[in-house]
Amino acid sequence: MKAIVKLHEIRNYHKIWKTVHGDTRYAEWFGNKHRIYLNMIGEQPIERTISEIQLIVSKALSENGYSLKDYSVGVATKKENTKNEFKIGRLLQRINPELKNKFDSDVTRVGVKLSGLKVVISKHPLDIMSMSTGRGWTSCMHLQTGQNKKYVAEDVKVGTLIAYLIRDNDLNIKNPVARVLIKPFVNDKDTLLVTENRVYGTDRTGFKETIDAWLNKLQTERRGVYSLNKSLYNDGKQSVMFGLGKTYTIIQQSMNNNFVVIFNSLNNKYGIMNKSGDFIINADYDHIAVDNNIKSTTFYKLMKRNVSGKNLYGGIFLDKDGKVVNAIEIIYFNNLQVISEKYAINCNEKGLYGIIDVDNNIILENKYLNIYKAGNSKNLVFAKNNNVTTIFNIETKEFLFDFKSINGSYINAIICPNDKVLFSIVSNVSSYLTEQKILNEKGEVIIDSCHSIHFLSDSHLNISKNINNCRIHAIYDIEQMKFITEFKYTIIDKIRVILSDIGKIFYKATKFVDKKKVEVFLDSNGNEIYSNEWDFCSQIHGTYLFSVGKNVDNTRKAELFDISKGEIVVSADRNYHWFDTSRTVKKSNFLITHSNRKRGIININTFEEVIPPIYDLIKLYANDAIFKVNNLWGYVNVKNEFIEPKFKSVLELKTFIKEERIKNKEEKKKLKEASKTIKKNGAV
């Protein structure tokens, strides 16, 4: 019979194990031994049925010269020589890989009549490294072919244990029935050993329970959240909660990690624990779901099944520390959706929806086929029955108005930044075109017909219509509830710069005059403050300035428009072709001009020309700039101190400037000392 693993592999892994003192690790549990044998919890023999997969496997083995010996354990023999045993999994991998997958997942292998089962827990490197090599199963940890075989060495290094399910006459683990890894999880205090979810081989009721009971007894004092050692392969568990002597799977952590939703695999129930490992909500629920729409607290929807198998819902509100702020009794059928910290949509046994508060008082009776929030509104909901939708205010308990759907039309809520709410009635005009009607909170029509609605600012909406197959825009003022422009613009955009220091909002729009495209600037009242038939218009990054202009006789003529003043501050008479709109140094006092492929500088505050556009390259800084012409570098600053371009490199120029500044400091120092001497001697 072939060796389980190769001899040189055993030597290498044993060397790693000794290097990290694996032989003395967990001495308080193992003493001077490397294996611990445990009796199975609740071992009761069960009769096995023969599956269709077993018959197919038996036939495939027979056709290839093998006889099935023990299907559940996964062992076969040669027909002519029954002395040596072979792993069925390895044989099928060669004969029929697809059939091997069916063999591995055959649930009837779990029900085999087995007696005298034991669990052996081992820290020995040979047992760990052969977890999926030479066994009746394979996995990604196979030493020769496994995709994740590199992690096996890490398991040996950091202290992973392995548990095998064996017969009591197989103490040396020659033909194990199943195996599962026990991996170290860590936090900032200590280490917790945790059984993995996945069992390889033929699992058996009581196998993992036996291991967990042993682990829980030895780790009772540990508490809190533990995460898988980062060196190890994650085969299903990333983090766990340990508390009250048990390990729980973490389903979800709170935003600040102060509490977690856990799953108890022993009773298949959910609960909530704090980071100290104490229960906030006992693990008595069939499901727990979090609702993150509540900002100041977190709402957890709790579900229990009643004796009739129907789902009942309730919930709790937890603050950031995991303290219960409020609760909703678990008496509601089918669903429960929280609207705010005070109200929730509930459903009765007949499938009808209503609204309750956290004290279970009825706010809206259960008589609607559906109820849902009106967009992101804090107080408004849509209550729907067939084709009639009622708008209801939860806080004031008022019915605003009813909307009746005709030919598939529907209603949307438009939540304005100033807390006003508008409503849009959407109708399908054709397969590709919709039409909208805008209503106020009283249900009154304020915009009879439009195509689309977009927010331009907190106060203004961009409304579009289709006129003669052309999309035309106008601005609607939410505060005044009226249009402040006509429908005459093909495009309206908010100017993307913060103008808080002048307290104004500006828009750039496009319209056509006598079939010519005209760019327009609008103020917050919808007035056109400047317009022209520009060929180009670009905002100077981080300023109120726009580079605008035309192409005249194949030559650009650029102007500089200051939108905060509503006037041209640099005219086309200066013969600049364009301005550098990128302005990479935001706080620079300079702006680069372009003309005939040459560059110059103007002062962005005074708009005076600092240097003409005669240079090949200019680099801006906050209060100064360097420029290049004919491969020579020069310098200028906001004080108009100018150094001719005569330096061959930037380094040479900077060295000169530094030396000049030192000289100037020394001159100032001499003048200051002379002034003191004159004053001291009384000279005038």
Image (spheres, rainbow, N blue to C red):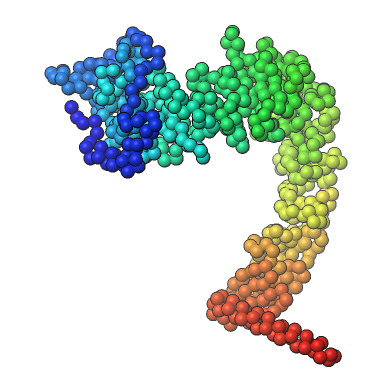
Q: Is residue 18 left or right of residue 476?
A: left
Please say if 449 is above or below 350: below
In the foreground, 214 or 596: 214
Quarter of the image holding residue 359? top right
Q: Position of residue 36 (x, y in %)?
A: 34, 25
Q: Residue 470, relative to residue 667: is it above or below?
A: above
Residue 284 picture location, percent across and down: 58, 18
Q: Position of residue 447 (x, y in %)?
A: 81, 35
Judge by depth and name the residue closer to the eye, 30 or 14: 30
Which quadrant of the figure has residue 3? top left
* Quadrant in the picture for the N terminus: top left
Q: Quadrant of the C terminus?
A: bottom right
In this rendering, position of residue 79 left or right of residue 504 = left
Give the residue drawn at x 73%, y 37%. 451
The residue most toward the right is 480
Answer yes or no: is residue 230 visible: yes
Choose top left, top right, bottom left or bottom right for residue 674. bottom right
The residue at the point 67 percent across, 76 percent down is 636
Instruction: Please indicate, yes or no, whether residue 289 appears anywhere in the rendered image.
Output: no
Residue name at image x 48 percent, y 33 percent: 238
